[in-house]
Structure formats: C-alpha cells, structure tokens
Image (cartoon, rainbow, N blue to C red):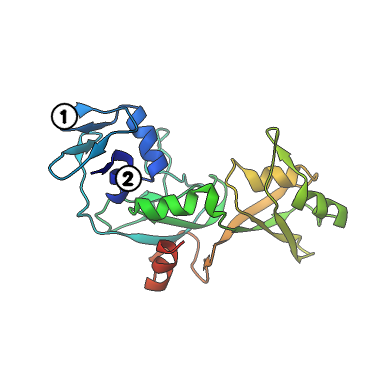
Amino acid sequence: MERLQKFMAECGVCSRRKAEEYIKEGKVTVNGVVVTEMGTKVGEGDVVRFSGRVINKEEKKVYILMNKPEGCVTAVTDDRGRKTVVDLVKGVNERIYPVGRLDYNTSGLLILTNDGDVANKLTHPKNKIDKVYEARIKRIPEPAEIFFFESDIFLDGRKTAPAKLEIITEEPPVVNVTIHEGRNRQVRRMLEEIDNKVISLKRVKIGSLSLGSLKKGKYREMMEEEVNYLKNL
C-alpha cells in the first residue's frame, strides 16, 4: 500500500504536491469514490481515476528538454486559448507536463516529463537546485547594488535566499542571475529592487543541465546521463 499522492506521481500524472491539490479539489476517485483526504492509501487492485481517466504505472517515462520561446504558457492547457509548451511537443503519446514554470515573456530551459518523482525532486525547496538566468538589462549595476541584490532583498515581506549576480557584458548590459527559489517573476522583481529593468530574460541552466545550442522553440529527448542526474538528485 502507498499514499495516493505518491501513486499519482509514480504514474506520471503530476508531482506529489500538485497531486495533493487535485485530491483536495475532488478530482481523484478510488474505486469509484471521490477521495479528498491526504492519508488515503491505495494498493494492488484499486482503480484510481484522475479527472475520469484511469491511471496506472505502466506508462513509459518521458524526459524532454525544451528551449521555451516567449509568448508561450508554461502549462498543459490554457483557459484563455494561448499556446502552451505542451502544444509545441509533437509525436509524444504519453501525458507530459512542464516541471516548474517560466513566465509568459521568459524563454529558456524547461523540462517536461511524466515522471512525478523527478518533478518533485526538481521543485522541492529542500533540494536548493540552482537556476541560472541570462538577463539583458537597462544598465550595469553598481558594486553596492550587486551586494544588496545578492544578500538583502525582500519580496512580499519575505527575504529572498542568497543569489548571485554576475556581469557578462557591459555593452549591451547582460548579466547572469543565479537563484534556487521559484517565486513569481522573481528575477525581474529582484532587479527592479535595485532600480533596474529586464529587457529580455532567458533561463540557461537548471543544476547541471544546460541549453547548449538548442534553438528557441525546439526540444529534444534528454540523454541517459541527464536523466540519471535528475533521478539521483
């Protein structure tokens, strides 16, 4: 027997934390009964449905690395009819979903999978996985501003975790920002706190994974060593 949210993650439906949300919303049934309690356990012979669809662990695991373009929603579907990152992926029969998110106007490295355990490892705060963003900004910050950026910024009344800001080029002004949190529009908002503005923003690394030469809007299956890296986080 195992907890329902863990079973859903292992079936590739979503991460464990997202599964808990779906359970609370009444979107999951076990043997025909809607379940909303976190302590529910399932075992062999139980029929679990998510949004009316039977889920099981037989689905092939898929791991995709994408260079997300701007003007695309990091989601499976969008109620406003906008293009999503899943719409860009062709020829994959399995139900995949993006891990974490990138803002609508931010491009760069995004992982899509149906492996809930991997998704949970990538997004769980305790793992503190570095994410590197390349930002073209309005101006090069002063040394005092860089010090403040890296150690003393508050967002929504809560201090941000230590970050890193590295100047890449002065003309045009381009910096790399390294964070391991995932707050809403965090890089843009942190730069606004030092009176700067993002012209364009691209995520170039997640942990040891990087975009490499992958062009914007394109994607590829992850290599075996990349998948092993994710599984061993």
Q: Position of residue 178 (x, y in %)?
A: 65, 57
- In the image, residue 222 above or below residue 58: below
Residue 27 in sight:
yes
- Picture disc at residue 32: 1
Q: Residue 207's spot in the image, x, y percent?
A: 54, 63
Q: Position of residue 202 (x, y in %)?
A: 59, 57
| SS type, badge 1 | loop
Q: Nearer the viewer, residue 84 or 130?
A: 130
Q: Sort mark 2 into few (<14), some (14-19) or many (20+) by Cα contacts within 10 Å.
A: many
Cα distance, mark 1 to mark 2? 19 Å
Question: Residue visible at 33% across and 40% down?
Answer: 5
Seen in the picture, residue 47 relative to 210 is either above or below; the reply is: above
| Image quarter in which the N terminus is found | top left
Q: Which residue is mark 2?
A: 6
Q: Secondary structure at mark 2?
A: helix
Quarter of the rendering containing residue 50: top left
11 relative to 171, above or below: above
Is residue 70 in view? no
The residue that appears at 35% across and 27% down in the rendered structure is 25
Farthest residue, direction left: 45
Q: Which amino acid type is shown beneath numbered disc 1?
A: Gly
Left or right of residue 203: residue 9: left
Q: Amino acid at mark 2?
A: Lys
Please name the residue shown 80% across and 54% down the image. 146
N-terminal of the pair, mark 1 or mark 2, is 2
> Is there a contact, CB below 8 Å, between mark 1 and mark 2?
no
Residue 16 percent coordinates (x, y): 38, 43
